[in-house]
Image: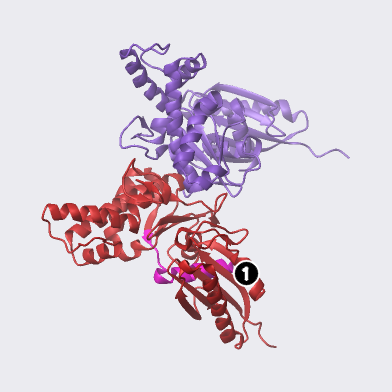
Chain colours: A red, B purple
C-alpha cells in the first residue's frame, strides 16, 4: 500500500527589504528557500509575480517527489486584515495598498492561504518551536527598527478586535523624547533599534563634547554600529545599550503588570546583544512591576534567530 | 413526571467592609440575600462562621421548595490562588492569611466551591449580564478605592500566570505623583477614587489660597465628597473630576494599545460620575492610543450598578 503523500507547506515572509518563499513538510525544518528583494518602490505587482514564480519553482521540485501542496502562509508587517487576507499599506511597504494577497495566491494555487502580521506569527513560531515552548502565557517582542509584540494568552494567539493587540511600541514612557511610531517618548522611540540609534546620536555628540573616547562617529549611527562597538568594549556604546535596556525594562514592566506572562521572548537586537541589554531590562522590570508577577516572568532572547521569519510564515501555513 | 429540581447557586462576596451571601436559581436574579459586616480586625474565623450560617439560612428556605444546592462561588479581593481556592491576605482583609475558603465550604456543604478575584469575577459578570454583553474582547475596570481590571480575551476570562493579569493600577504614568498600589505616579495613584481624594486635597488647598469658592473643605476629602459637590455645580470639584478623567484616559490608552478591546466597561466611580469623568477620559484615550484601536473601542460605565458584587459571585458559582 502506498504511504499517504506528504503535505507541503509554503511560507511567504514579506519584508520591506526582502521577501522569502520557502517550503517544508515538517516545520520548523525548511526543505528549500528562495529569496529576492521586495523593492516596494515598484509597487506590489512585480514582487507578487516573483512570489508566484518562487512558489511554482518550489512546487516543481517537490511535487515530483510525491508530496502535494497543503497550504500557504503569508507573514507581513501590519496593518493588515487577517480575516479578509488583505495587506493594508504597512509603513515598510507603503505602496501595498489593500493587496488581497490570500485571494491572489488561493486563485493561483488552489489551496488555503492565510495572512498574519509578523509580530503575531513570530509569537506563534517562538511559542511552538523556540524559546516560548511549554508556556501558557507568553509575550514575544520584535525589537528591530520598530518595536511590537505578539501575545499568547492561555496557549493561543490573542489578536484583539482589529488584529492590533500587542502595540506596546506605541505606549508612552515620557512626555517627550525620541520619536517612534509617530510619538515622542514612546516605547518604540526609546527602546527599539531605531530609538537606540536616536539616543546614540545624542549620547555620542555629548561624549565628544566632553572629549570621551569612542569609536562611534558620523552623521548616522545605527543600532548595529552601537552593538559592534560595544562588543569591542567601547564604553560609550555600552552606556547606550544599558540605557536602552533600562527603557526596555520599563516596557516589560507594563506588559508584566497587565498580562502576567510566564515568559517574555525578545527577538531582534536582544538576540545579538544578550545580557548586556537584558540585565538592565530585567533589573528595571523587577523594580517597576508587581513583585509576584515579575518573579514569575522569565525574560529571554528569542531562540529561532535568523530563521524566525521563515518559521513564522510556516506557522501561518500550519494555522496559528 | 416530576420536573427536575432547580439547581441553587450560592454566591459569597467578601469585601473589606461587608460580606454578602446570596442565592439564585437563575442568575443574575437573586432570590435571597444576607449581608453582615466582615470586621477583618477580628480575623477570618467569625466572618467564616457567619458565611456558613448565612448559607444554611438560605438553604433551609430554598430546599423546602424542592431546589438542591448546585455550587458555591466566592468573589474576593486579590491576591488569592483560584486553583487551590486560598485567600492570601488581600490589603483590605490583611488578617485573612492563606485561608482555604473553598475547602472549608466544600467540606461544610458537600458541593463544588470556586474562588475568583473580584476584578476578574466582575469582568465575567459585566460580560455575561451587563455592559459587555456580545463582546469578544473586553476590559472591565474597577474604579473604587483601588484601580484594577479584569480581561476578557476571545470570549474567555484571561487570568495570566498567577491570576495577576489586569493590574493596570500598578502601571506608572509619571515619575512622581499621588501614591496608589504602593507606587507614586501610578494609575491607581492618579485615577482611582483614592487617587482622586489625594488630588482633591491638594487642589482644594490651592483653590483656597487663591480664594476660589468651593464647598469642599476639611482634613479629608473623599471621592464621594467630590462627586456630590460636582453634581451641585462646584467648579473646583468639576475641575478635579475632569483632571482624574484625563489620567483615566492615559490608562485606557495603554490598555487599548496592548489589548485592542472592543469595549472598556468601567465600574465604581464611573457609574456615578458618567460623562463628566468619561468624556475627558475618552478624549485623552483617542489622542494617546493608536487611531484604529481607539476608534474601535467603546468606553462605557458598568451596567450592573450596586448589584455587581452579587452577580460577580454568582458568575463564579456558575463557573467563569
Residue A144 seen anywhere in this rendered image of the structure? yes
In the image, residue B44 lies at what x, y percent? Answer: 48, 29
Q: Is residue B313 a member of the stretch shown in magenta?
A: no
In the image, residue B145 lies at what x, y percent? Answer: 45, 27
Q: Is residue A303 a member of the stretch shown in magenta?
A: yes
Relative depth, front residue between A50 and A308: A50
Relative depth, front residue between B26 and B124: B124
Residue B110 seen anywhere in this rendered image of the structure? no
Query: What residue lies at 22% left-to-right and 65% top-to-bottom?
Result: A229
- Asked if residue B240 lies left or right of residue B267, the reply is left
- B16 vs B85: above or below: above
Quadrant of the drawing holding the C terminus of chain A: bottom right
SS for callout 1: helix
Quadrant of the drawing holding the N terminus of chain A: bottom right
- Asked if residue B2 lies left or right of residue A50, the reply is right
Q: Look at the image and give the residue range highlighted in magenta.
A: A300-320
Res B210 quadrant in image: top left
Query: What residue lies at 57% left-to-right and 44% top-to-bottom?
Result: B296
Extreme-front residue of the structure: A42
Residue at image mark 1: A104
- B148 vs A50: above or below: above
- Asked if residue B258 lies left or right of residue B105, the reply is left
Examine the residues drawn in magenta and state their main secondary structure: helix
How crowded pointer 1 is (Cα within 10 Å; few <14, some 14-19, many 20+) is rated as some
Q: Chain of mark 1?
A: A
- A252 vs A221: above or below: above
In the image, residue A303 lies at what x, y percent? Answer: 40, 67
Amino acid at each position: 500500500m502506498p504511504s499517504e503523500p506528504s503535505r507541503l507547506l509554503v511560507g511567504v515572509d514579506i519584508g520591506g527589504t526582502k521577501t522569502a518563499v520557502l517550503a517544508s513538510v515538517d516545520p520548523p525544518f525548511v526543505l528549500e528557500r528562495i529569496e529576492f528583494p521586495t523593492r516596494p518602490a515598484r509597487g506590489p505587482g512585480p514582487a507578487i509575480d516573483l512570489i508566484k514564480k518562487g512558489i511554482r519553482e518550489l512546487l516543481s521540485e517537490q511535487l515530483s517527489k510525491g508530496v502535494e501542496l497543503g497550504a500557504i502562509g503569508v507573514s507581513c508587517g501590519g496593518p493588515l486584515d487577517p480575516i479578509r487576507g488583505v495587506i493594508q499599506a504597512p509603513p515598510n511597504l507603503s505602496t501595498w495598498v489593500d493587496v488581497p494577497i490570500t485571494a491572489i495566491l488561493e486563485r493561483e494555487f488552489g489551496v488555503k492561504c492565510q495572512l498574519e502580521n509578523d509580530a503575531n506569527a513570530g509569537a506563534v513560531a517562538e511559542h511552538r518551536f523556540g524559546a516560548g515552548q511549554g508556556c501558557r502565557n507568553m509575550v514575544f517582542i520584535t525589537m528591530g527598527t520598530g518595536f511590537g509584540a505578539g501575545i499568547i494568552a492561555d496557549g493561543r494567539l490573542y489578536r484583539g478586535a482589529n488584529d492590533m493587540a500587542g502595540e506596546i511600541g506605541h505606549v508612552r514612557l515620557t512626555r517627550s523624547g525620541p520619536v517612534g511610531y509617530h510619538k515622542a517618548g514612546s516605547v518604540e522611540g526609546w527602546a527599539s533599534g531605531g530609538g537606540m540609534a536616536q539616543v546614540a546620536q545624542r549620547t555620542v555628540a555629548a561624549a565628544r563634547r566632553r572629549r570621551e573616547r569612542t569609536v562611534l562617529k558620523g552623521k548616522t549611527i545605527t543600532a548595529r554600529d552601537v552593538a559592534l562597538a560595544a562588543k569591542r568594549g567601547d564604553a560609550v556604546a555600552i552606556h547606550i545599550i544599558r540605557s536602552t535596556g533600562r527603557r526596555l525594562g520599563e516596557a516589560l514592566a507594563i506588559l508584566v503588570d497587565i498580562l502576567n506572562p510566564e515568559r517574555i521572548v525578545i527577538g531582534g537586537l536582544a538576540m545579538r546583544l544578550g545580557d548586556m541589554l537584558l540585565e538592565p531590562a530585567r533589573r528595571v522590570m523587577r523594580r517597576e512591576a508587581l513583585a509576584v508577577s515579575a518573579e514569575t516572568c522569565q525574560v529571554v532572547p528569542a531562540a529561532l534567530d535568523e530563521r524566525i521569519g521563515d518559521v513564522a510564515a510556516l506557522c501561518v501555513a500550519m494555522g496559528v
